[in-house]
Amino acid sequence: MSDGAGPESETETGRLKQWLLLDGNRFAIAASIAATFGAASLLLSISGLAPIADAQPLFYAFSGLISGNFTLITVVVSINQLLLSQELKSPGELESEIQQTVDYREEVEAVSNRTAPAEPSGFLRLVVESARRDAQRLGGTTVGSLPADTRDEIDEIVTELTDEFDRIDGLVEESDSGIFNTLSTTLETNFAHEIQRLETARRAHGDEIPAKTDDAIDDLLDRLREMDIARQYFKSVYLQVELSRLSRYLFYAGVPAVGTAIAALFVMTVASGPPFGRPVRAVLFPLAIAVGVFPLTLLLSYILRTATVTERTAAITPFTTPEQEI
């Protein structure tokens, strides 16, 4: 029984980690962490370990929350300045960037002989379709033209790539068309080893590989590079969108948090003590703490995802990193 429990436990742990780092709703994660802070404070107060008989420590706690949330507002301003600095470009820089993007788009269209969709999800599916077609064409050129060991090696690579293309295409089809949902389908994709194996096979059996197979390998390598270019571009767009949202959401959450902490401080300035009994105090102050830490937990939830995306897409083709070997 224990032998079967291990893999299942690892699977559940992996799903929880995936939900926490990438798939989970950022507000739900932030609210859960903030609620944990509030529940821990509530448990301490009702258990008698921290009965809140003296309001002076709470005074320091809420003062710290106020200063901390004002620091978060400073972070928001810094994020906005960073985004603004990236958007402020001269006409020449804008023209060059647009032209490079158009050139890449036309390259993809020329290979697929189709007009590339404007949405990220549709564009990615077009790139994946072109890569799948060239992979299958490579597999077809090996029939009867290569020694058995070389043909088996290339066919194995083609099979692995085709399976990965099918996985990505299925995920894109099932997911929403948002930029993160499109990008997330490629976070577990890494073609560095397949590129290395194709190059190794070509170098080792160069004299035995016919021209049509060699050309098919070049075309497939180009498609794999195009997929990585698309992923890196989608990542840059996603990070700008995500950080813009984060800065706005931190303002939305920061104002109520600061207001709640200030209100708690005013309540504690009453000379005779808070104008409510200890049972109400034991519940009200932990609730105020949960509201006060929510901007911090919101920042944490978003940074977890942006940092994970950046880590898993740090290397570009044909390189890889241990963090991308998941």
Image (tube, rainbow, N blue to C red):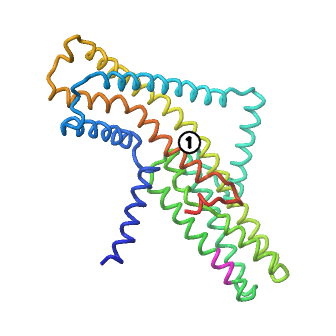
State the image quarter where residue 264 is shown: top left
Q: x, y (%) of residue 117?
A: 59, 48
Quick check: 318 above or below 266?
A: below
Q: In the depicted view, which residue is nearer to us: 249 or 202?
A: 249
- Tell whether 57 sits left or right of 110: left
Quick check: 99 above or below 170?
A: above
Per the image, the residue denoted by label 1 is: 238
Q: Quadrant of the C terminus?
A: bottom right
Q: Quadrant of the N terminus?
A: bottom left
In the orientation shown, which residue stands out farthest toward the top? 271
Q: In the depicted view, which residue is nearer to us: 57 or 228?
A: 57
Quick check: 180 above or below 276?
A: below
Residue at the spot 56% in from the left edge and 42% down from the top edge: 238
Quick check: 132 above or below 23?
A: below
Residue at the spot 50% in from the left edge and 46% down from the top edge: 305
Q: x, y (%) of residue 151?
A: 70, 83
Residue at the spot 30% in from the left edge and 21% down from the top edge: 56
State the image quarter where residue 140 is shown: bottom right
Q: x, y (%) of residue 92?
A: 78, 29
Q: x, y (%) of residue 204?
A: 80, 79
Which residues, given as a range, are shown in magenta? 152-157
What kind of residue is marked 1? Tyr
